[in-house]
Image: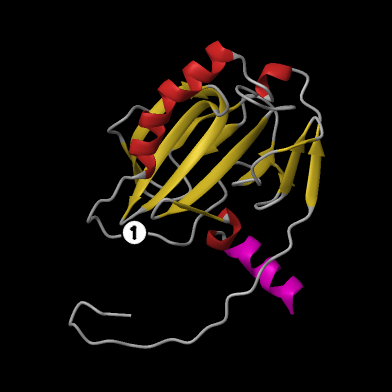
Amino acid sequence: MVKSDNTTTEYNFEIVDKDYPAQYITIKNKRMVNPNPDDLKRIGSERPAINKALNTWTEQPVEELLFSLPVIGRLSSPFGLKRFFNNQPKNPHSGLDIAAPTGTTISAPAPGLVINTGSYYYNGNTVFLDHGQGLVTGYFHMSKITVKAGQIVEQGTKLGEVGETGRVTGPHLHWNVYLNKTKVDPALFVPELSESKEEKAQ
C-alpha cells in the first residue's frame, strides 16, 4: 500500500473462495424473469444512468464507515446467495434484503449526497447515495422516494419508504453497498451485523 507521503507498507493475506447457499424464488410476473423485447429495451435504456451513479468518485473524505441499518425489519436475504428465479439460475444476490411493511421509513445509514433517484425495471423506485471516494450505496424497491438528486443527507435522513416495486415477492428494502464499483456485503459496515459474522466464523 502506498500512503499519501509516498511511503509503502506491505500486507500479506490469503484470499479463499466462499461457498454461498442457494436460494430458490418463485416470481409470479414471468416477465421479471424472462423480459420481452420491449422490457429489454427499457432495461438497456436505464443502464447508463445506473452506471453513472456506480462510477461516481469524489474527493470528499468518507465521514462515517460505521453504518446504521437503513430500515427496521427482518433480515430476509443475506449477501451472496446463489439465486434461482423460477428454477432458472440468475446473478448472485448483490445486497442485503430487509423485510418490512410497505410505508416503513428508510433512512440514510451515513452522511452522503443523493446522486440518482429513479424508477427502474428490476430495482423499482431507487435512490443512490455517494459517501465519498468510491463508496456508493443503493436502496431499491421503494414505494415512495422523499429525496432529490443533489440533496445532502445526514445519517438518519429519511430517503423514502419500503415498497414492492420492481422484481420482488413482497415488501422489503434491497440495500447495496459498492466500493469502487464492486458490490460488497452491507453487513460489514453495520457493527452489530459484522460482529455477528465474526462470532460465527470463530
Residue 189 percent location from the top left of the image: 53, 60
Instruction: Please tell me whether residue 50 is drawn above or below residue 177 in the rendered image.
Output: above
Instruction: Please tell me whether residue 32 is drawn above or below residue 8 in the rendered image.
Output: above
Residue in front for this viewpoint, 52 or 103? 52
Residue 146 percent location from the top left of the image: 43, 25
Instruction: Please tell me whether residue 164 is drawn above or below residue 63 in the rendered image.
Output: above
Left or right of 73? Residue 42 is: left
Is 104 within the magenta?
Answer: no
Decide if residue 101 is in sight here.
yes
Left or right of 130? Residue 127 is: right
From the image, give the main secondary structure of the stretch colored magenta.
Answer: helix
- Residue occupying the point 28% across, 50% down: 57
Residue 200 percent location from the top left of the image: 75, 71
Q: What residue type is disc 1 on?
A: Glu
- Residue occupying the point 36% across, 30% down: 48
- Residue occupying the point 62% across, 65% down: 194
Residue in front for this viewpoint, 9 or 60? 9
Q: Residues within 10 Å of mark 1 (few under 14, many from 20)?
A: few
Instruction: Please tell me whether residue 84 is drawn above or below residue 30 in the rendered image.
Output: below
Which of the 4 quarters of the picture holds residue 196? bottom right
Decide if residue 146 is in sight here.
no
